[in-house]
Image (cartoon, grey):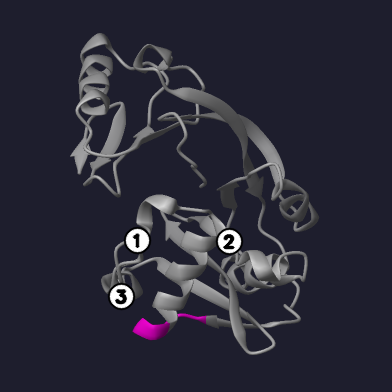
Amino acid sequence: MIRRRGFVAVDGDERAGLRILIQEPDLDLGELAELSELARRAAGPVNAEDPFSSTDLSHLGMRSWQMPVMLRPPGPVGEPVLKVIRVRRSEDLQAAERIVIEGFELTGFEPYRLGELFPTTLIEQPGVDVFVASHDGVAAGACVSVVDDGVGSHYWVGTSPAFRSRGVGRAVMLASLAHLADLPVTLTASKLGRPLYESLGYIAATPSTWWASPHVTVSP
């Protein structure tokens, strides 16, 4: 973990790579230079998110695109029509991990290694919950919710390709929103996911710019 005033970075191995979250709109020259050096010497793929869309990383040869940061105000939540569990067992966490790797096409995590993306300690992490939705008895969708400082957020809302367009994403979102109904909740939406989130009461707040190494798939 590398923490600076303007960004936080996690520097991993050749599979996990380097992940950067820009936290201020006005990185100074020193911060930009350090961030750039981290990217140049990264062992694996580089992914960076700039929710302010104010930091230009094109000098690193990375591609960029935008996705909206969305906000859902506190409000009632419906019931899912599919079975969804809050993960408490390591085998269910493994199922969630495999769904996310498959659903987001995270080829850098193949061949699969147990606990590499979702370590077992995630189950006991305060404020963090993992959910798994089943379709006809098969684990089909997953997501991660986080609560910090009175705000909820969602990450890795994914569905196995074989179960898409069957209500799995909606079910896992409804179940994971149930304990967040009294909080404002945020997420970053892909183009395909945005209609679902809008139907659940999310509104687009601001565009976030994502940067990635060439040919790397990145999802929130």
Q: Residues within 10 Å of mark 2 (few under 14, many from 20)?
A: many
Q: Which label belongs to residue 124?
A: 3
> From the viewer's perspective, is residue 160 above or below residue 21?
below
Q: Is residue 89 magenta?
A: yes
Could you tell which of marks 2 and 1 lies nearer the N-terminus? 1
Q: Residues within 10 Å of mark 3 (few under 14, many from 20)?
A: few
Depth check, front residue: 208 or 5:
208
Residue displayed at 35% across by 66% down: 112
Residue that numbered label 1 is attached to: 117
> From the viewer's perspective, is residue 18 above or below residue 160?
above
Type of the residue with mark 2: Gly
Q: Please provide the residue range marked out in magenta.
A: 86-91
Depth check, front residue: 128 or 191:
191
Q: In front of the other: label 3 or label 1?
A: 1
Q: Position of residue 217 (x, y in %)?
A: 49, 42
Taking the image as shown, residue 189 lies to the left or right of residue 220, namely right
Q: Position of residue 166 (x, y in %)?
A: 77, 71
Whole-angstrom CA distance, mark 3 to mark 1, is: 15 Å
Q: Position of residue 83 (x, y in %)?
A: 65, 85
Q: Which label belongs to residue 100?
A: none
- SS class of the residue under badge 1? loop
Name the quarter where the N terminus is drawn. Answer: top left
